Structures are given as C-alpha cells and as structure tokens.
Amino acid sequence: SVVKQAGGFLSSKEAGLLYWAASEWPVSGPVLELGSFEGRSTLVFALSGRQVYAVDAWSEETLAGKASAEVVFDRFKENIRQAGVEALVSIHRGMSHELGKSWIIPGAVLFVDAGHEYEDVKGDLDIWTPHLLPAGLLLMHDVLGDKHLDVTCAASELVRQNWRVVLSAGSIVAFTRK
C-alpha cells in the first residue's frame, strides 16, 4: 500500500488506530499532526478523508543526522503526491512549539509525534491542546513501551490533568478530556 511505502515508524496496528480516529471520531474538523517525517501517518489521516495540517521542522537538527532534512521533506511531498491527497494536506514547516504559538485553526484530532524529549513533548501538549476542540481526540505516539520514557512521563501526567484514556494500539494512546 501507499502507506507502507512511506518511511516512518508507524506499525500497521498503529495505522489502524489512526485511521479509525480520523474516520470514526464524531467531531468534525481537521487533524493537527505534529511530526510528519516522510508522511506515513499523514497519509493514513488524509486517506480517511480528513483535512490534515502537517507540522514538522524537517530540519537537520530534529533528524539528528539520521537523514538529510531536504531528502526527507522531498520524500514526504512525493508520498503525498503519489497517494493523490495533496488537496487534503496542508504543510507547515517549522518547529511545532513555535508554530503552535500563533496557530488559529482548531482541530478535531491532535496527533503528537514531534520531539521526544520531556520538555518538547510537554511543551507541545501545553501549546497545542488548547487548539483541540472540546470533544476532540488527542493521540500520542511512542507512549507505551520502554523506548521513549520522556514521552511516557508527559503522557501519564495527562491522566491527572482532566484527560482520560480512550484506547491504545502499539505505542499510541488516545485521550479525551473528562
């Protein structure tokens, strides 16, 4: 499938959860996606028919030498083009915490998969969750498992802050406000 061809770290089980969220969550509005890489999650959301605002730095700093930022960004754009979902994907290149400060578009679904250090995740949650519609769905990647403990820590704090877990698949946890 076009989704599997896109580079990334999203498993089939996780992609299924994202597709369910985008196609079945009963709140109208776009997906706000923090962290797009080569577009695997972006494609899942767009193929469900939702508008996606893809926010990623696509920078050498954020990729930490794993790949050339321009090569990854070009792959992202090509993956979106090949899937025929350009009309549903709006690209916003920059650091998520910077773009979020001046963001004005509310989202029905917020997918957080940008920086994985505690301060980055906490900052993204603090800046971006106010842009989530009241009954919107917050999805966080890399929460479960022992690979990204800073993400796990930031996500666990949500439960004490008026959020409840709806479901999970792979390393993704879905939350709504209580």
Image (spheres, grey):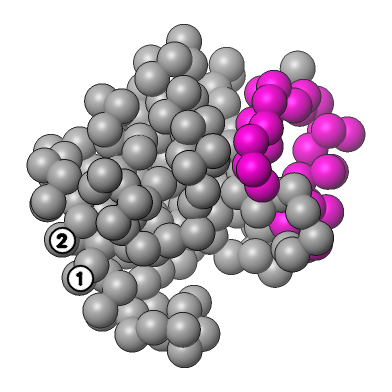
Disc 1, SS? helix
Taking depth in this image into account, of 176 and 102 the one nearest to the observer is: 176
Magenta highlight on residue 162: yes
- Residue 122 quadrant: bottom right
- Residue 19 quadrant: top left
The image shows residue 43 at horizontal and vertical percentages of 30, 43
**Residue drawn at (48%, 16%) of the image:** 25
Segment tinted magenta in the rendering? 149-176
Q: Are marks 2 and 1 in contact (CB under 8 Å)?
A: yes
Q: Kindly identify which residue carries mark 2.
A: 78
The image shows residue 57 at horizontal and vertical percentages of 40, 69
- Residue 140 quadrant: top right
**Residue 125 seen by the camera:** no
Residue 49: image tag: none
Q: Is residue 114 above or below residue 45?
A: below
**Residue drawn at (39%, 56%) of the image:** 36
User: Within 10 angstroms of label 1, few (less than 14), some, or many (20 or more) residues?
Assistant: some
**Residue 64 vs residue 144: left or right?**
left
Q: Amino acid at mark 2?
A: Glu
The image shows residue 170 at horizontal and vertical percentages of 64, 43
Q: Separation of disc 2 and disc 1 at Cα?
A: 6 Å
**Residue drawn at (66%, 47%) of the image:** 171
Magenta highlight on residue 5: no
Q: Kindly identify which residue carries mark 1.
A: 74
Judged from this view, the residue extending furthest toward the right is 160
Disc 2, SS? helix
The image shows residue 159 at horizontal and vertical percentages of 83, 33
Q: Amino acid at mark 1?
A: Asp
Taking depth in this image into account, of 148 and 5 the one nearest to the observer is: 5
**Residue drawn at (35%, 29%) of the image:** 30
